[in-house]
Amino acid sequence: MSLKAKIEAVIYAAEEPVTLAQMASIFLDEALAARSASDLPFDAAPPEGEEAVEPNPADASAQTGQPPLPLEDAEARKQARLREREARLALQPIVEELIAEYANGERGMEIREIAGGYRMATKAEYHDAVRSFVKTLKPQMKLSLQALETLAVVAYKQPVTAPEISEIRGVDTSGVLGGLMSRKLITTAGRKQVIGRPILYKTTKEFLLRFGLKDVSELPSMEEFEKMAADMAESDASDVEALSSEPVADAGTEPESPLSSATDTVTEETSSLETAPEAPGSEP
C-alpha cells in the first residue's frame, strides 16, 4: 500500500482534523524514505508558518528551570526534531496532491484544511442532497435564535465582552453565554483593560469544527450570514406548516397544535439557555 493511500485512510478515519505533526509521527520512516527517494536536500525550508530556528538547549533549560541536558542528549533531540520536520516536508506535498485529486475529480467528498489539520467533508455543491438526507434522520438539538445571534456577535466581534454583546442585541445575554460555554462553542479570553475589567469572550476550536472553518477569516460576510439566517427561518417555517397540515390520527381526542408544540420546544430550549448558570469567573 502506498504512503498516499495510507494518509488518505487516516484522514478519512479520523473524527477530528489530522495535523501534519500527527501524520509525521505515524509515518516517520516512510516519509523520510520517500523524501530520500525524491533527491530533495536535507534540512530544507520548514512548512509554511513554521520557523526554521532550532532552540538552544541552554536557553530551553533556563526557561524550564531544569538542569542543562548533556550534549549527547541535546544533539539527539535536535536530530529527532530535524527528522520530524523532514517528515512533515515530505508529507505536505502528498497531502496537497490528495486535496487536488479530490477537488478536481468527480467526487462528492473533498479534503479540507480545518482548525490546523485536515479532514474529509462533503463538497458544498452537494449541500442540498446531503440536507435532504439529514432531514430524514432524527433531528439533533439546535441552537435557539438567541443563542445563534449571540454566537454570531462573538464570532464577528471577538474578543468581546458581555455588556458589548448585550448592547448590540439589546437584551441581557449572560445566560446565553453560559449555555454557549457549556457547549464549548465559546471560551473566555482574559479581561478587557477598562473600569470593571469585564471578561472577554472568543470562539473555540470546537466552533471551527462544528461549522467546518479553517479559521475565523472564512466566516461569511454579514450580508451572507443574514441571507443564510433568513433561508433557515423560511425552511423552519415551511416545516412547521407541513406539520400543521398532517391529518389527526384519533378524531376522538382534541389534537395538540403542531405549531404550538414547535413553539413550546423553542421556548423550552431558549429558557434552558437563558437560565443556564454562569460559568466560573464570569461577570455578574
Image (spheres, rainbow, N blue to C red):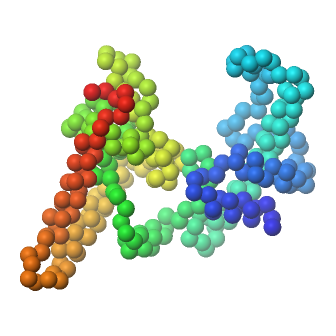
Q: Is residue 228 left or right of residue 216?
A: left
Res 54 visible: yes
Comparing 275 with 189, the one in front is: 275
Say if 196 sits above or below 211 in the image: above
Q: Quadrant of the N terminus?
A: bottom right
Q: Position of residue 17 (x, y in %)?
A: 60, 52
* Residue shown at 22% from the left, 48% from the top: 271
Q: Position of residue 60 (x, y in %)?
A: 74, 21
Q: Is residue 35 left or right of residue 113?
A: right
* Residue shown at 29% from the left, 66% from the top: 235
Q: Position of residue 96 (x, y in %)?
A: 70, 56
Counting labels gives: 0
Say if 33 sits above or below 64 in the image: below
* Residue shown at 48% from the left, 70% from the top: 126
Q: Is residue 163 left or right of residue 281?
A: left
* Residue shown at 22% from the left, 54% from the top: 268
Q: Quadrant of the C terminus?
A: top left
Comparing 168 with 171, the one in front is: 171
Comparing 82 with 48, the one in front is: 82
Res 149 visible: no
In which quarter of the view is residue 127 placed?
bottom left
